[in-house]
Image (spheres, rainbow, N blue to C red):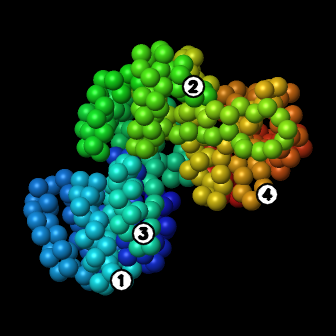
């Protein structure tokens, strides 16, 4: 098993809260991690709520669960039984001890709302994303393959690029035809797939609902709804613009990225590294992949945004924590060069330190407070911030 960074957080939460939720997209490794956790607990019970035999045990939910008050009970695919949340609250209030329930689910707005309302003060929420650099620990020559395939375990561990692509294409179909309808979302699969593919072509650009709606033939609120569906199911990340009062005209639209680079490449029908390096999306894809790694590797205390003014001052990622500001500029070049706008942004924001993340083999200082950083060193650098 590839060690997951979140494991220690889950174990700590189980020591502190009666219920712990482990949320994330399908096939990110939630069930594998849950089985590993239960193997370390002497008394545990695992129920898969997609399995009829396990569902049958919950015909009388309160009666069955109350018989196992001394066990860690794992409820997988919890979104299948939203009526369980009030029962769990009652059982927890009757016997409030830590580590009673581990809830696994693919996040949806409905699931998060019901769990938050029913189990407020009793539950810890945790997100399990696909693999990141610290978990895979690829060698320098394997970084590009990790970027190509993305972080979903079965995609990364596939025997060939062709097998990886086939898995990702199947995942996309399943997500559209099975997962999203299971969340109670009524949008036709082919419609949402076409929207998803349009987003892939606009990967890394600022969000303009009206322009996209005109090209898609629907209203701006409709495409906004489609975007929110993909964001709620961990397929899309929105990067907001930096909110700061500098007396400058700032870009106010968010930037939109597909979270997993492997799914981006599958939607664009990019089969291998040769196809990727020759594709117009190679630069934005690299930018989005680096952004996702930084978002996963930095501690949650950091907030991420981008900075861009009407006069061209720009930094791809501004990470803030209290009064600290760290900048990340992302370049798909073996000899990255920085524009005048970058240096203006450094002065505008009083950036403490900036890193230019590029596909180079060895890092080096570019200027005072600006270092070129190989992607392979991202995990180590983010741990030190």
How far across and down, in percent of the image, does residue 153 sit? 39, 45
Q: CA distance from mark 2 to mark 4?
A: 31 Å
Question: Which residue in the protein does label 2 denote?
Answer: 208
Tag 3 or tag 2, which sits nearer the N-term?
3
Reading the chain from its start, which is encountered first: label 1 or label 4?
1
Q: Nearer the viewer, mark 2 or mark 1?
A: 2
| Quarter that holds the C terminus | bottom right
Residue named by callout 4: 323
Under tag 3, what secondary structure? loop
Residue located at (78% from left, 26% from top): 310
Query: Can residue 212 be seen in the rendering of this structure?
Result: yes
Real-space Cα separation, disc 3 to disc 4, in angstroms: 31 Å
Report helix, strand or loop for mark 4: loop
The residue indicated by pointer 3 is: 120
Q: Are marks 1 and 4 in contact (CB under 8 Å)?
A: no
Relative image position of residue 45 (x, y in whole percent): 23, 71
Rounded to the nearest whole Å, what is the CA distance between mark 3 and mark 1?
13 Å
Instruction: Look at the picture and state if 356 lies above or below 191.
Output: below
Q: On the image, numbered disc 1 is attached to which residue?
A: 96
For label 2, count other residues whose C-alpha is less than 10 Å away and answer few (under 14), some (14-19) or many (20+): some
Decide which of tag 2 and tag 1 comes sooner along the chain: 1
Left or right for 281, reference 161: right
Q: Name the quarter where the N terminus is drawn.
A: bottom left
Question: Which is more N-terminal, label 4 or label 3?
Answer: 3
Q: Residue at x 59, y 48 (%)?
A: 295
Q: Please name which of the two marks, 3 or 1, marks the residue nearer to the observer.
A: 3
Q: Is residue 62 left or right of residue 239?
A: left
């Amino acid at each position: 098993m590839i060690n997951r960074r979140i494991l220690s957080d889950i174990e700590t939460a189980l020591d502190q809260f009666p219920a712990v939720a482990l949320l994330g997209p399908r096939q990110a490794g939630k069930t594998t991690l849950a089985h590993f956790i239960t193997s370390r607990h002497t008394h545990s019970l695992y129920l898969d709520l997609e399995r009829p035999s396990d569902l049958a045990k919950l015909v009388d939910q309160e009666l069955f669960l109350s018989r196992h008050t001394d066990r860690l009970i794992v409820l997988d695919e919890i979104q299948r039984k939203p009526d369980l949340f009030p029962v769990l609250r009652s059982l927890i209030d009757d016997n409030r001890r830590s580590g009673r329930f581990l809830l696994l689910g693919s996040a949806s707005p409905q699931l998060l709302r019901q769990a938050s309302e029913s189990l407020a003060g009793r539950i810890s929420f945790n997100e399990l994303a696909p693999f990141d650099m610290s978990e895979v620990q690829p060698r320098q020559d394997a970084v590009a393959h990790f970027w190509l395939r993305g972080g979903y375990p079965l995609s990364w561990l596939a025997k060939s690029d062709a097998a990886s692509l086939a898995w990702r294409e199947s995942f996309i179909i399943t997500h559209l035809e099975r997962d999203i309808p299971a969340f109670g979302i009524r949008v036709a699969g082919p419609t949402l797939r076409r929207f998803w593919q349009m987003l892939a072509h606009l990967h890394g650009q600022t969000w303009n609902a009206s322009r996209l709606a005109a090209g898609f033939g629907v209203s701006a609120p409709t495409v906004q709804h489609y975007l929110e569906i993909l964001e709620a199911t961990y397929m899309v990340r929105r990067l907001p613009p930096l909110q700061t009062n500098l007396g400058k005209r700032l870009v106010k639209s968010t930037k939109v990225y597909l979270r997993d680079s492997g799914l981006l490449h599958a939607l664009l029908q990019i089969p291998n590294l040769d196809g990727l390096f020759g594709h117009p999306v190679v630069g934005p894809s690299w930018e989005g992949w680096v952004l996702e790694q930084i978002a996963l590797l930095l501690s949650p205390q950091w907030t991420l945004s981008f900075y861009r003014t009407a006069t061209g001052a720009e930094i791809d990622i501004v990470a803030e924590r209290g009064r600290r500001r760290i900048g990340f500029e992302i370049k798909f070049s073996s000899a990255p060069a920085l524009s005048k706008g970058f240096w203006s942004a450094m002065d505008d924001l009083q950036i403490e330190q900036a890193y230019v993340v590029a596909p180079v083999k060895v890092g080096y200082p570019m200027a005072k407070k600006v270092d070129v950083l190989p992607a392979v060193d991202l995990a180590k650098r983010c741990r030190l911030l």
